[in-house]
Image (spheres, grey):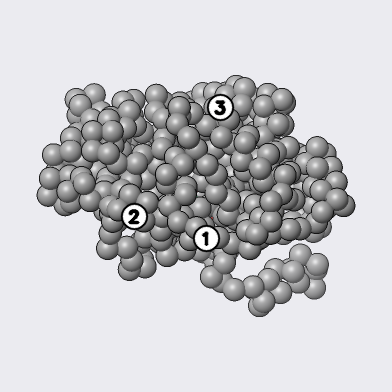
Amino acid sequence: MCIKNNLIEKDAALLSDVMKLRFYPITVNSGKGATLIDIEGKEYLDFNAGWGVANTGYGHPRIVKAVCDQMNRMSFTSPVSTVNVESIDLAEELIALTPGDFAKKVWFGHSGSDANEFIAKIVPLATGRPRILSFVGSYHGQTMGSYAMSGHPAQSRFISGGNVIKLPYPYCHRCPFGRNLCECNLFCLKYIEDYALKSICEPDQIGAIVIEAIQCDGGDIVPPEGFLEGLQSICQNHGILYIFDEVKVGFGRTGKMFGFENWGVVPDAIVMGKPLGGGQPLSAVVGRKELMDAAVGAHLFTTAGNSVACVSALETIKIIKEEGLMENAKVIGDFLMDAFKKLKSKYDVIADVRGKGLLLGIELVNKSNEPDAELTALVVYRSYELGLLYYYAGVFNNVLEFTPPLTINMEQAEFAVETIEKAIQDVLDGKVNRDKVAFYAGWG
Ligand code: PMP
């Protein structure tokens, strides 16, 4: 049997399905920049970056060096009970990076999930207000508190969180209120003030509103102008903490260091993860001191914020700033957005293209303008066969999602556009084997 099939069989036999979401049979042996090389030596351009983790690309020499040097000096100590310089340096950097003219502190964890778990657990404790508002379609994590706040079908299948109220996210392409952006006057905000806060729960019961600046796994949805600012006013009027989940859009992806910086808002707390650790498992919450000091030892993890992960993060942040990755995300992102708009005018199956910087989505539909999950899965699979890696997202599983490393160049962007177009055309021409793809459930 060939090496690749052997590996795939072993993976199926040995690794729990509970930890998998598979879209095609990619195996990975090595990676450099935005390129992944499989076990048989075939090269792929990675437009997913390990679900938005590899913002600086694979094997960045500065990160490799920082991690190796740290391993040699001090491989591990638990910040839970020892003071160490690397976690202090990183906390200082994160506080300096984030807006807000108030005292802040930093908590460290390993994943977006445990960081959002901090919010679910500590907000009620710190504020004395038991409830949290979050949004339909949001993805905050897979642990009990974080999935309770999530509104993505992957998590909402679990019964949880009687204290969480989920509000409609402003998904203007398919407005939950059936309105049109030009004349709606942001009815979604009015709904919160006039309905949610009047009939579902009293504002003085609400500790926080938790939101993604761009809703990623929910379908790469960019909120309309004025929405996030309006939500901030609601929070300020009622003494509610305004908390941003920046796990996927943070650290340069949208062309700004944080996604919310595309709008005029100042969060009370910011949840970070994925790209923060430069490939090491690391998450953080940066927030108002009163929230962060609510109770001693109430949400701690033995290996969280360890020195190796912290030096990797410090180097990642330096690279994003010094190598112009935010600027690159904007320039290449704008190019891709224009190219996707051209594809939209050519293909009826493309209903919408959206995003900011290098977080982009293409929504696919059938002839009746309904979400077409099968078409989407086929296009993703065909792209893999043609050498381009990315997955799909969205509550209806019909959004091609692109989150490449922020280091990609124009030539790679052009290859991606050509490949996506070819994949769409090949699927429409019936060239893709549906049975082969049906085996890969993805989010479905
Ligand atoms: N928040 C957001 C916005 C996410 O996109 C994700 C993961 N898709 C998470 C939290 C959870 O992160 P993790 O998988 O690292 O627990």
Residue under label 1? 297
Label 2: state its secondary structure.
helix
Say which of 236 and 44 sits in front: 236
Residue found at x 53% / y 70%: 18
Q: What residue is pinned by disc 3?
A: 255
- Please state which of the two labelled residues, at mark 1 or mark 2, is closer to the viewer: 1
Question: Which residue: 71% across, 74% down?
Answer: 10
Give 391 or 149, whichever is nearer the viewer. Answer: 149
Residue drawn at 50 percent across, 58 percent down:
296
Mark 1: amino acid: Gly
Q: Nearer the viewer, mark 3 or mark 1?
A: 1
x, y percent for residue 27: 72, 59
Q: Say if disc 1 is inside 8 Å of ligand 1.
A: no
Is residue 434 visible in the rendered image? The answer is: no
Residue receiving disc 2: 124
User: Label 2 sits on what residue type?
Assistant: Pro
Q: Position of residue 426 (x, y in %)?
A: 56, 45
Dot 1, crowdedness within 10 Å: few (<14), some or many (≥20)? few
Classify mark 3: helix, strand or loop.
loop
Query: In 3D space, how far apart are the residues under numbered discs 3 and 2 (Cα atoms)?
Result: 33 Å
Instruction: Name the element at disc 1.
Output: loop
Q: Residue furthest bottom?
A: 13
User: In whole angstroms, how far apart are the C-alphas of marks 1 and 2?
Assistant: 16 Å
Give x and y (percent) for residue 325. Answer: 66, 28
